[in-house]
Image: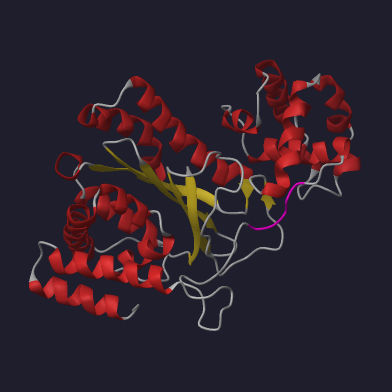
């Protein structure tokens, strides 16, 4: 599995106008169909997993380039536009309560794609663990409120989810692609974009956190009674924790650690995937491990660079001209071949020209 990107966007409230959304669905259907017929389903999924290409698609469909709604509304439009019966692709999940229906929707689409029981189980797990990692393993202050799961009849999938930070008034988008990466919990990022880089983020999927992940597992495998002193007298840990003792050392977290001890997770991924284990438990285990074992987790924000295709002066990295041109070409050809009216094509191409 490959996590392919993160994007930060100003957090905007409100609802998409009906007239605009209807046009986004129509144009989204035409572009999606053209890409799938011309390049194949796998290429369509790959493009959706690219945060830069996805952003361009949202803009071409008519949404503001700097709005958090570029994620939620574009995904909602694609969900209505793309039919699993016609194109072999299904768009599941969505915003808020709709996101929690993803497991049920996986069950429903499995009847169309004839997935085995094992495939259904794996797809549900992929949906769950992506959310867990972006909410608990990476604690960047963005709380997930949107989760879209796109899959094809082969069982390949893309996850596009978004979190919000009401304090910073930004939304951050996370992209995943079900190829190449062997582990969910170590460096699953290949292209992370953000204009809002934080100085301190608990990043338990960083390579530097490998020992910290192992220490958390060792901690819960040992007799948890040895942890009572930390919960009873948290003052020795306050300098490491960014929360008050009342939030970090409560009975509920201790009970969860006891349950983890009974479960005996084999690795950090199993620990993280355990029901009821969230950010507070992961943070407490990580920082207690720091005190007991002296293992320091990574505190770097997993943002690698800030520009879609690099900078002309080579900062933060040189422009990948081949990637840039191919992204533009695929979108341009899709618009031209889409089964939509000439006016819609012209308007979409004009919008695309702004980003060429």
Q: Position of residue 77 (x, y in %)?
A: 26, 55
In the image: residue 66, left or right of residue 204: left
Q: Of 244 and 206, which appears nearest the observer?
A: 206
Which quadrant would residue 323 be assigned to in this image? bottom left
Protein image colouring:
secondary structure
Q: Of 253 and 240, which appears nearest the observer?
A: 240
Q: Position of residue 20 (x, y in %)?
A: 22, 65
Q: Is residue 223 visible?
A: yes
Q: Is residue 108 shown above or below 234?
A: above
Q: Position of residue 231 (x, y in %)?
A: 83, 31
Which quadrant would residue 276 be assigned to in this image? top right
Farthest residue, direction bottom: 313
Q: Is residue 232 shown above or below 303?
A: above
Residue at 53% from the left image edge and 39% from the top image edge: 182
Q: Position of residue 34 (x, y in %)?
A: 17, 58
Residue at 65% from the left image edge and 33% from the top image edge: 268
The magenta stretch spans which residues?
Answer: 297-301
Q: Is residue 68 shown above or below 183?
A: below
Farthest residue, direction front: 322
Q: Is residue 61 visible?
A: no
Which quadrant would residue 149 be assigned to in this image? top left
**Residue 40 lies in magenta, yes or no?**
no
Q: Of 73 and 192, which appears nearest the observer?
A: 192
Residue at 75% from the left image edge and 32% from the top image edge: 250
Instruction: Check the picture and name the quadrant holding the C terminus.
Output: bottom left
Residue at 48% from the left image edge and 47% from the top image edge: 2
Q: Is residue 42 shown above or below 199?
A: above
Q: Main secondary structure of the magenta part?
A: loop
């Amino acid at each position: 599995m490959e996590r392919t990107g993160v994007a930060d966007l100003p957090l905007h409230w409100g609802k998409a106008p009906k007239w605009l959304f209807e046009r986004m669905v129509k144009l989204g259907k035409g572009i999606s169909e053209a890409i799938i017929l011309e390049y194949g389903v796998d290429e369509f999924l790959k493009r959706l997993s690219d945060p830069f290409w996805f952003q361009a698609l949202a803009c071409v469909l008519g949404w503001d380039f700097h709005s958090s709604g570029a994620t939620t509304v574009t995904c909602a439009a694609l969900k209505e536009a793309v039919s699993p019966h016609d194109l072999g692709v299904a768009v599941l999940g969505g915003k808020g309560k709709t996101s929690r229906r993803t497991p049920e929707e996986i069950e429903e689409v499995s009847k169309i794609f004839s997935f085995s029981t094992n495939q259904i189980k794996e797809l549900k797990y992929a949906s769950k663990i992506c959310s867990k990692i972006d909410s608990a393993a990476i604690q960047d202050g963005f709380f997930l409120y949107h989760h879209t799961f796109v899959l094809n009849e082969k069982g390949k999938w893309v996850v596009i989810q978004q979190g919000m930070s009401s304090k910073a008034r930004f939304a951050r988008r996370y992209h995943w692609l079900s190829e190449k990466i062997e582990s969910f919990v170590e460096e699953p990022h290949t292209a992370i974009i953000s204009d809002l880089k934080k100085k301190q983020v608990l990043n338990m999927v960083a390579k530097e956190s490998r020992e910290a992940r192992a220490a958390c597992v060792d901690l819960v495998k040992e007799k948890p009674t040895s942890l009572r002193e930390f919960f009873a007298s948290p003052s020795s840990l306050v300098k490491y924790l960014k929360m008050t003792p009342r939030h970090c050392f409560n009975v509920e977290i201790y009970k969860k650690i006891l349950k983890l001890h009974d479960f005996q997770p084999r690795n950090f991924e199993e620990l993280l995937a355990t029901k009821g284990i969230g950010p507070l438990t992961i943070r407490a285990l990580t920082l207690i491990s720091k005190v007991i074992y002296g293992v320091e987790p990574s505190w770097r924000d997993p943002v690698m660079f800030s520009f879609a295709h690099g900078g002309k002066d080579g900062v933060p990295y040189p422009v990948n001209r081949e990637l840039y041109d191919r992204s533009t070409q695929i979108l341009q050809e899709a618009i031209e071949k889409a089964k939509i009216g000439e006016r819609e094509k012209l308007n979409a191409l004009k919008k695309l020209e702004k980003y060429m």
